Amino acid sequence: MSTGIYGTAAVGLGAGANYVASEAARTAGARGERATAAVLNTFATRAAVLHDLKVPGQKRVNIDHAIVTGCTVIFIDSKNWKPGFYWSAGSTSFRGFFGRTHTSQGVAIAHDRWAKHLSPYKAKVPTPLVAVWSDDQAKTAARALARSSTPGRIAGASPTVWALSYPGAKAVPATALAGRIEKLLVNDTPDPLIVAELCRYLTRQPAPTGF
């Protein structure tokens, strides 16, 4: 197991995902995950890209994506939010002045569990990223994934998240995701033992499209 794409984005948001509030939320969430997958898959010739992973010791928490580059594992979650200015005051987050925004502890829990689980492999597990899309942006990128093509310019109004404090993670606008991943890649092949261990936790385990 080395570079390539493992797993399928958003399969964990199927009908059995009883932790999702509504069908509309499920649809929007899946679109965000597929949009992130379209961006991450462009790195599959240089890294191992994984989608929809369970979390060791957790039944109601998952992590949407991971990239393995050398011995480094970058976890990425996806959000599909309304456009607006997102900001935090203490432990409370808001969109503009119209109400609170839910930023769960799930990513922080997943990061902590995975960092401990992968410690025997000497894996480096930096602060996870949360890719934040608007629905218009997500639709554009998700269509690219459906066509197995590379997303072009990500069009649409973008949520502004520089003032948002996301628990245990760094929120990044979708337009900045590829650049952020590029900076985190190392000049080394993915550790095959780390990739194999992560693959054990894929929500679905199809044959990988390895390179």
Image (cartoon, helix red, strand yellow):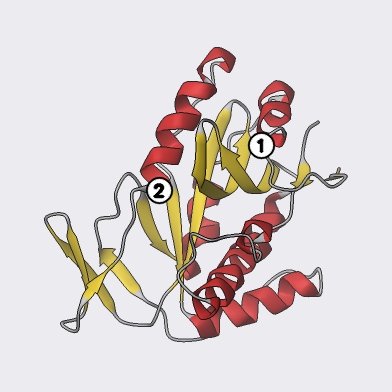
- Closer to the chain start, of discs 1 and 2, is 2
Is residue 58 or residue 197 the one in the foreground? 58
Q: Amino acid at mark 2?
A: Gly
Q: Residues within 10 Å of mark 1 (few under 14, many from 20)?
A: some
Q: Is residue 202 visible?
A: yes
Residue ID for mark 1: 201
* Left or right, 72 with reference to 96: right
Give the CA separation, mark 1 to mark 2.
16 Å
* Left or right, 61 with reference to 40: left
**Residue shown at 64% from the left, 75% from the top:** 141
Whether residue 174 is situated above or below residue 4 in the rendered picture: below
**Residue shown at 63% from the left, 81% from the top:** 140
Asked which quadrant contains residue 26, the reply is bottom right
Q: Quadrant of the C terminus?
A: top right
Q: Which secondary structure lies at badge 1? A: loop
Whether residue 65 is situated above or below residue 81 in the rendered picture: above
Q: Which secondary structure lies at badge 2? A: helix
**Residue shown at 62% from the left, 44% from the top:** 53
Is residue 12 or residue 183 the one in the foreground? 12
Q: Is residue 154 visible?
A: no
Residue ID for mark 2: 106
Asked which quadrant contains residue 198, the reply is top right
Pinpoint residue 61: horizontal percent, then vertical percent: 49, 46
* Left or right, 11 with reference to 57: right
Pinpoint residue 171: horizontal percent, then vertical percent: 37, 58
Whether residue 55 is situated above or below residue 33 in the rendered picture: above
Is residue 210 or residue 201 the one in the foreground? 201
